[in-house]
Image (cartoon, helix red, strand yellow):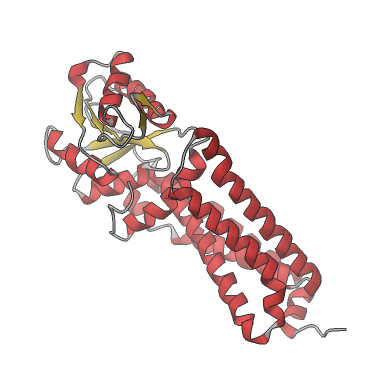
Amino acid sequence: MRSISRPRRFCRDHPSLALGFALAGAVLLVFGSVFYLYFAQASLRVSLGLLPVPLFGSALLLFGGFLRVFGQPARRGVQLLVRGGVCIGLLLILLSFVPSYLAGIHNPGQLVFSALAILGILGSLLWNVLGRVRGLRILRGVFTFLYGLGLLAVVGLTLCMVGGAVGPQAPDGTTVLVLGSKVSGETPSADLQARIDTAAAWLAAHPSSQAIACGGQGANESISEAEAIRRGLLKQGIAEERIALEDRSTSTEENIRNAIALLPAKDAPVAILTDDYHVCRGRLLAQKMGLAAYPVPSRSPWAYFPAFYARELLALPVELLGLHGLFV
């Protein structure tokens, strides 16, 4: 019978320790998120300073879960890890490809979920093997640390996206930038149509506001994204003189930068209208260009959300690190 190491025996004999870490983490995660979202309604930049609190809570929660598994008998602990890792991996693969395939979407977001899924499945299946070879045990620790770090990054970036979409309401008279998305021939994608519908309702509720339809013409697009937005708004009763076109951009950064020339004043406040997960990045870009930016989130179609949300997990940290322009 194999002897149990002291750390494992300690965790086994003190299950309340794992529970304590998990509960403390859950409390910090919940209350930290509530305070973060509360301050996000006033200022996105101020609320970002509160992100370490829910992130620390998430870390404690993960650590508590790790201690719980570590304190199990070796065979049972491995079984829990393998089953959990494989189930999570398969779920991520399903989220990556099934909704997107049905909607005909292909983007880097699918690769994010797929990479996480493959790492989770392989790491879970090889966990016991790595532990048996002394020289490879360090790899198990490195894998665990990096995977945990990745999960924390997902939590933090998701909170950024949510916080970016719940800011203060734009006053009447604010110019709204309607950011473009894919057009098939002359037909807006479901994603873009949702933005058009949201823009029409917002403009109807803000009669003194103007709109700038943003987006150039891409491959397989018979008209520019801006023109598709303009046509959609006209169909819903928005007066043509309230709509300006920015039809040369190819990225979110260019959407906003080119639209500045069409504003009544270069420092005029704007409202960023795009998908809920995308609003945060749009507002950060606008603020870097010296604009006060209000959020107007559009609800993403369910089939589009997994892949585009995962792509935003790549694009948002690039923006936060000041490397914007690498993602559209």
Q: Position of residue 102 (x, y in %)?
A: 55, 34
Instruction: Looking at this view, name the residue that lies furthest to the front.
Output: 220
Percent position (x, y) of residue 32? 50, 55
Q: Answer left or right for 153 relative to 64.
A: left
- Indicate whether 271 appears above or below 112: above
- Residue 26 is left or right of residue 293, and the answer is right
Looking at the image, residue 305 sits to the left or right of residue 265; the answer is right
Toward the viewer: 326 or 155? 326
Give the vertical position of 328 relative to 263 (above or below).
Answer: below
Location of residue 58 in the rendering, given as x and y in whole percent from the top left corner: 55, 60
Task: Locate residue 306, reporting x and y percent.
Answer: 51, 43
| Residue that extends furthest to the right in the rendered view of this protein | 1
Q: Residue at x 32, y 14 (%)?
A: 235
Decide which of 253, 18 is in the foreground and name it. 253
Q: Is residue 92 visible?
A: yes
Q: Quadrant of the N terminus?
A: bottom right
Asked if residue 315 is positioned above or below residue 236 in the image, the reply reads: below
Q: Report the number of discs.
A: 0
Rendered image quadrant of residue 178: top left
The residue lying toward the viewer, choosing from 225 and 56, is: 225
Residue at 67% across / 60% down in the picture? 85
Name the image quarter holding residue 293: top left
